[in-house]
Amino acid sequence: MRITGGAWRSRRLRGPGRTTAVRPTPDAMRERAFAVLGDRVLGARCLDLFAGTGAVGLEALSRGAASVVFAEHHFATARILRANCESFELESDRAAVIIRPAADAVAGLARSGQRFDLAWADPPFEIWQEGLEAVVAAFASGLLAPEGLACLECPEKADVEAALPAGLEIVRDLKGGASRVVMMQRTVVSRSNVPR
């Protein structure tokens, strides 16, 4: 597992052991998604839900994001996440790790008045709906900026469209193998920043 682009391109990350159920976003899918996100990442405040090893958030920082908040509820996985963040010697204002379930992290961050430009949720595939619920809560609570974008990584056959509430729309759907990354925004925002 490695960073695929930006200042830390090709730097290796510590991955999960073979005995853990953590499923990091494959390098190829991460590279493809960030190519689509493009300049949206520059200077962005990012939220990495179900962060796992932190590969997505660290990719964002490598590609110019201002900061990332990582949320991971599993203590053993959070140790790997912290080790990966420490290996980059990041300042505390650029990377923060919250060890809480995604829904709790979203609620707490919203109460504290934080705002993010980009959110990524990569839940275990068997509970992909919980990832969508966390993303919807982030939009509903104002945790995502008005033109914020959320990315949900889920199984290729997940029926995200049917589960999406009114007020949100899918703007890109990247499929690859057994997974997909669904990018969504509020329906009322300007289309000028939609990834093409």
Image (cartoon, grey):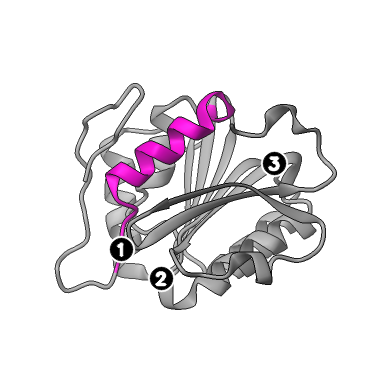
Query: Which residue is the extreme one toward the left?
Result: 18
Instruction: For the residues labelled 1 and 2, say whether their Cβ atoms are less than 8 Å apart.
Output: yes
Residue 124 tag number:
2
Left or right of 192: which side holds 31? left
Q: CA distance from mark 3 to mark 2?
A: 23 Å
Query: Which residue is the extreme one toward the right?
Result: 188
Helix, strand or loop at mark 2: loop
Instruction: For the residues labelled 3 and 2, say whether their Cβ atoms are less than 8 Å apart.
Output: no
Label the magenta part by its dominant secondary structure. Answer: helix
Amino acid type shown at disc 1: Arg
Closer-to-camera residue (38/76): 38
Residue 148 tag number:
3
60, above or below 142, in the image = above
Reading the image, the residue beneath label 1 is 23
Q: Magenta residues? A: 22-41
Q: Position of residue 76 (x, y in %)?
A: 29, 68
Left or right of 19: which side holds 116? right
